[in-house]
Image (cartoon, grey):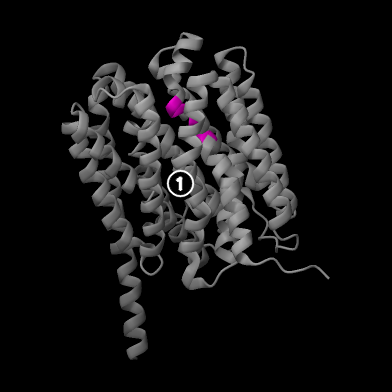
């Protein structure tokens, strides 16, 4: 008889793997100056290590969901981590910039399907009232990666060369692989078979489509500035390369605090909570526009940006699952996959816009363009709130009758 694994340990395994994945997703943010020097590319080209990775997840999340939908969840998690390790080793030993980008795409394919499957598993293994918190625990791996993984990888890159940063991440991936093999249950139920028609059903639902746009713009707005955070801190605020490593650690701590609080606040009413979170992020990015040239005020604003940056993630992921359960119950996994894709559409869009802004206007203008993206997401969130109200009123009238 198979011994039942506690949901706490399952969430721990998912968080460990998410830590590895989070480390590689954002590692190039701290390595951009080194990549520019090593491959003799421009800042905008170096920024492609972020945007290409995000595009790989955007395409890979729904595609890999279609291809792997009927594979045992335990087996799938092991395959995912093996693919992840392979991608990072390709990046580590890349002889040319294009090969580095190829390695990033391979790792991104693993990332997309991992976050899709892990989000659903996290929500399913706990009580309904704790689903956003469970997703937040899983995503804590990502936030802890920004606290320790990304700064440590950056420091390793500065001391021994950027290649060692990707080797470091590969080692973390091996630890994640072992955690998944031991702690993810072997008898998890398979979801309904994902189909291409499921994509159309999700995208054809107005509320789900609007929610996906909110995810892309609300989450992606931060990355207009965050992708170029190291140059911003060094060139505009006057911090040394060594100080930037420490700042990234503190930034990551703020992200972890925001993510934890965001999960708790979104448990009951995710939409109302998201509206407040986006408003806080919008104000912070606007303030950063004016403080980006200040040594201390700029740093303080950057830390507030970290607080709001990932706060919306648990609520966005929970809300899309709730909408799918209500509107397209056979496509919950696909809806989750498309939302993971939407997160990375936002990253690709945000980092891409950031690259153009740095080229055309300069680093100091990146926060204001990010604020513009978040402002649109605020408007769309208000639209979702209005769409949800008529249904509630009809239910109340029906109950009175």
Query: Where 244 sits versus 64, above or below?
Result: above
| Residue 258: % across, % down | 36, 52
Q: Is residue 198 visible?
A: no
Q: Quadrant of the image for the N terminus?
A: bottom right
Please check the rendered image and state whether residue 44 is part of the magenta-colored stretch, yes or no: no
Residue that mark 1 sits on? 143
- The residue sitting at the right extreme is 1
In the image shown, does 94 or 16 lie closer to the viewer? Answer: 16
Q: How many marks?
A: 1
Question: Under tag 1, what secondary structure?
Answer: helix
Residue 315: image x %, image y %? 41, 58
Q: Residue at x 63, y 31 (%)?
A: 106
* Residue 376 figure quarter: top left
Instruction: Assess whether residue 25 is covered by the magenta stretch.
Output: yes
Along the viewing direction, whichever of 3 and 108 lies nearer the viewer: 3
- Give the overall secondary structure of the magenta segment: helix
Q: In what quadrant of the picture does the C terminus appear?
A: bottom left
Q: Is residue 194 above or below residue 163?
A: below
Callout 1 environment at 10 Å: few (<14), some (14 to 19), or many (20+)?
Answer: many
Tell which of 215 and 135 is nearer to you.
Answer: 135
For residue 350, side relative to residue 143 (left or right): left
Judged from this view, the residue extending furthest toward the top is 40
Residue 98 in the image: state x and y as whole percent: 57, 16
Residue shown at the point (35%, 72%) measured from the top left: 391
Residues shaded magenta: 24-30
Residue at (39, 17) in percent of width and height:
43
Question: Which residue is at the far left?
Answer: 290
Residue 336 visible within the image: yes
Q: Which residue appears at 31% of the width and 71% of the height?
A: 390
Image: 260 above or below 124: above
């Amino acid at each position: 008889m198979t011994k039942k694994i506690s949901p706490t340990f399952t969430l721990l395994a998912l968080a460990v793997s998410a830590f590895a994945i989070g480390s590689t997703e954002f590692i190039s943010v701290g390595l951009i100056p080194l990549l520019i020097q090593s491959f003799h590319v421009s800042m905008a080209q170096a920024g492609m290590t972020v945007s290409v990775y995000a595009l790989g997840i955007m395409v890979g999340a729904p595609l890999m969901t279609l291809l792997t939908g009927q594979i045992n969840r335990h087996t799938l998690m092991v395959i995912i981590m093996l693919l992840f390790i392979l991608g990072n080793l390709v990046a580590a030993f890349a002889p040319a910039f294009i090969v580095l980008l190829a390695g990033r795409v391979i790792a991104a394919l693993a990332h997309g399907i991992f976050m899709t499957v892990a989000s659903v598993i996290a929500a399913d293994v706990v009580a309904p009232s704790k689903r956003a918190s469970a997703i937040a625990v899983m995503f804590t791996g990502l936030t802890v990666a920004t606290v320790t993984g990304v700064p440590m990888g950056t420091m390793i890159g500065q001391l021994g060369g950027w290649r060692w940063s990707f080797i470091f991440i590969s080692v973390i991936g091996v630890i994640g692989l072992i955690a998944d093999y031991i702690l993810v249950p072997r008898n998890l139920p398979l979801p309904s078979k994902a189909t291409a028609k499921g994509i159309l059903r999700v995208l054809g639902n107005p509320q789900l489509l609007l929610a996906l746009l909110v995810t892309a713009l609300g989450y992606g707005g931060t990355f207009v500035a965050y992708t170029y955070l190291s140059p911003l801190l060094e060139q505009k605020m006057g911090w040394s390369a060594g100080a930037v490593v420490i700042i990234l650690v503190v930034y990551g701590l703020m992200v972890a605090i925001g993510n934890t609080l965001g999960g708790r606040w979104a448990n009951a009413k995710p939409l109302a909570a998201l509206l407040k979170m986006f408003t806080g992020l919008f104000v912070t990015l606007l303030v950063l526009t004016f403080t980006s040239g200040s040594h201390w005020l700029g740093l303080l604003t950057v830390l507030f940006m970290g607080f709001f940056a990932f706060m919306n993630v648990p609520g966005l992921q929970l809300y899309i699952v709730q909408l799918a359960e209500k509107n397209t119950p056979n496509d919950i996994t696909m809806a989750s996959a498309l939302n993971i894709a939407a997160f990375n559409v936002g990253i690709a869009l945000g980092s891409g816009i950031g690259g153009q802004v740095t080229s055309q206007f300069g680093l100091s203008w990146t926060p204001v363009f990010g604020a513009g993206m978040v402002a649109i997401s605020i408007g769309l969130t208000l639209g979702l709130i209005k769409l949800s109200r008529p249904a509630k009123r009809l239910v109340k009238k029906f109950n009175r009758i």
